[in-house]
Amino acid sequence: MRIETVPISRINYLNLRNLILDKGLTMEDTIVLSTENFDDLILEYREIYKESMPIPHILLGVLIREAENEFVPLQSVIIIKDDTKSIRYLEAEDDFNYYEGEIFYRCGYCGNVVNNLGLVLEGQERKRAINYHENYQYKIVKHVDGKCCRP
Ligand SMILES: [Zn+2]
């Protein structure tokens, strides 16, 4: 477990997302925000999605949480790498929703919804993917060689 304090000019969803990508953070890592910044993020989330932010909150696989006993300096966040102590819930009770940042795969030729291997999704999986595609603003879509077109 390694802890790093990172200055960030404005703490919002987009900048957190960029930070995660820039630093190459993964599911093993956690970003800690001051209580004030975390509250602002909750408000921003509500504006964007018109619903309450799920907590614990996962962005691109990274847990975003409010400071507990950490001191977070102004205009900074704390990154905990290899956060073995964190407990994550990836939408445990509602697996119909994609978590923020989950990748949505489509066939690059016909646009069919597929998985990362290009296999066409069916039934509930298909509904879930389409629901995600229609409802999430910050979705990530990747095109792959679909088995439907390139068996
Ligand atoms: Zn196809």
Image (cartoon, rainbow, N blue to C red):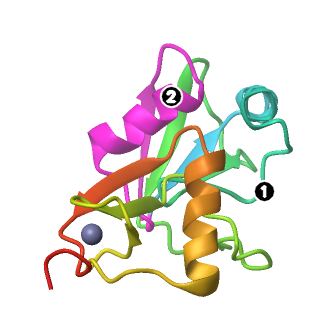
Q: Which residue is pictured at 70% across the width and 33% down the height?
A: 34
The image quadrant where one finds the C terminus is bottom left
Using the image, determine if residue 118 lies above or below residue 58: below
Q: Is residue 85 visible?
A: no
Front-most of 84 and 115?
115
Labels 1 and 2 touching (C-beta < 8 A): no
All told, the count of numbered labels is 2
Q: Earlier in the sequence, mark 1 or mark 2?
A: 2
Q: Which residue is pictured at 50% across the width and 28% down the height?
A: 14
**Image x and y of residue 54, in percent:** 78, 54
Q: Which residues are magenta?
A: 1-28
Q: Quadrant of residue 45?
A: top right
Q: Residues within 10 Å of mark 2 (few under 14, many from 20)?
A: few
Spatial separation of the CA atoms under disc 1 and disc 2? 18 Å
Using the image, determine if residue 92 lies above or below residue 77: below
Q: Quadrant of residue 111?
A: bottom left
**Image x and y of residue 24, in percent:** 29, 50
**Image x and y of residue 20, in percent:** 39, 43
Q: Which mark is residue 14?
A: 2
Q: Residues within 10 Å of mark 1 (few under 14, many from 20)?
A: few
**Image x and y of residue 36, in percent:** 78, 26
Front-most of 78 and 123?
123
Front-most of 136 and 118?
118
The residue furthest left is 150
The residue that label 1 is drawn on is 55
Using the image, determine if residue 113 lies above or below residue 31: below
Indicate which quadrant contains ligand 1: bottom left
The image quadrant where one finds the N terminus is bottom left
Whether residue 7 sits left or right of residue 51 in the image: it is left
**SS for dot 1:** loop
Whether residue 51 sits left or right of residue 79 in the image: it is right
